[in-house]
Amino acid sequence: MVLIEPTPRLPCSGTEPGAEPACKINAALLALDQEALALPCGLLDDATIAAQGLDPGRNPLQMWYAHWVVVTHQGASFYSLTLHADAFCPGGAHGWTEQSAVLFDLTTGAKVDPFTLLPVALRPDTPFPPAPLDPVPLDPVPLDPVPLDPAPLAPDGQTPPPLTAPPHTLPPLTALYLEVLAKTDPTGAADCAGTITQQQALTPDQTMDFLLYPEAATRSLILTPQGLAHAARPCEIGVPLDLPLLESLGADPRLIVDLQP
């Protein structure tokens, strides 16, 4: 079964004052709908399957694919949607889900990277300094020959464990996420903080993947981890970056105004 919901359109006559940004946004939304129509499983029509003698299981009737849209915010400056997909491909071990966010500037009609609403230091593409290492001693190197004996044994007779590097500083955005998660969802933090930290450790020199979008219902930016393993998907918990926090962080002033009651 294939269920595809089109993105909602903005009022656009093409002649009214200020209509151009809305028409530009609608053109971008149409392109998103056309992308959603490209079925995710590499499926073929019946005629091609028969002509090439392929597995009938590649018929679209043997798959599940649902695509739907949620308008999360429409203010004076920004228009935000989340796009959702839920699919199961024939022959797959399990289904998959996908969520993405699209943000538009209502004054220009341009698509906006949601992370530009945050201060520069919190953006995923901003380099961040690694954790400082312990200072290296500057004593002269001893002239005695280095012993070639095995590592000395600990008092209990066991070989001491190898030295480990100091922990790496978390990127600011990941650290902010864990801080807000602990405040807003202590149970989720207890269950998932380790999972998030381990995921971040896979790419220690860059921020792990997050989804970010404004949400009118909570008057906040929603920050959600992305790209976790299938078994860890329950840890993709969205947290609200509320107005007081956004103001203290120095988020985009137009967003602050847009989210005000």
Image (spheres, rainbow, N blue to C red):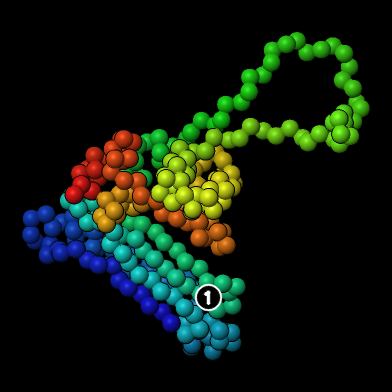
Instruction: Pick the residue in front: 162 or 116.
Output: 162
Q: Is residue 223 above or below residue 65?
A: above
Instruction: Pick the residue in front: 112 or 152.
Output: 152
Question: Taking 82 as reference, is 162 left or right?
Answer: right
The crowd level at tag 1 (other Cα within 10 Å; few <14, some 14-19, many 20+) is many
Q: Is residue 173 visible?
A: no
Q: Quadrant of residue 19?
A: bottom left
In which quadrant of the rendered image does the N terminus lie? bottom left
Q: Which residue, as the protein is rendered here, is positioned at the far right?
A: 149
Q: Amino acid at mark 1?
A: Cys
* Residue 253 at x, y percent in the picture: 24, 39
Q: Is residue 122 above or below residue 74?
A: above
Q: Is residue 164 visible?
A: yes
How many labels were placed on the picture?
Answer: 1
Question: Taking 110 as reference, is 157 left or right?
Answer: right
Q: Is residue 176 above or below residue 225?
A: above
Q: Quadrant of residue 81?
A: bottom left
Q: Residue at x 51, y 60 (%)?
A: 233
Secondary structure beneath disc 1? Answer: loop
Q: Residue at x 53, y 56 (%)?
A: 228
Residue under circle 1? 89
* Residue 149 at x, y percent in the picture: 92, 27
Q: Which residue, as the protein is rendered here, is positioned at the far left?
A: 16
Q: Residue at x 51, y 74 (%)?
A: 88
Question: Taking 26 as reference, is 44 left or right?
Answer: right
* Residue 55 at x, y percent in the picture: 59, 84
Q: Residue at x 47, y 49 (%)?
A: 186
Instruction: Pick the residue in front: 11 or 53.
Output: 11
Question: Taking 128 as reference, is 258 left or right?
Answer: left
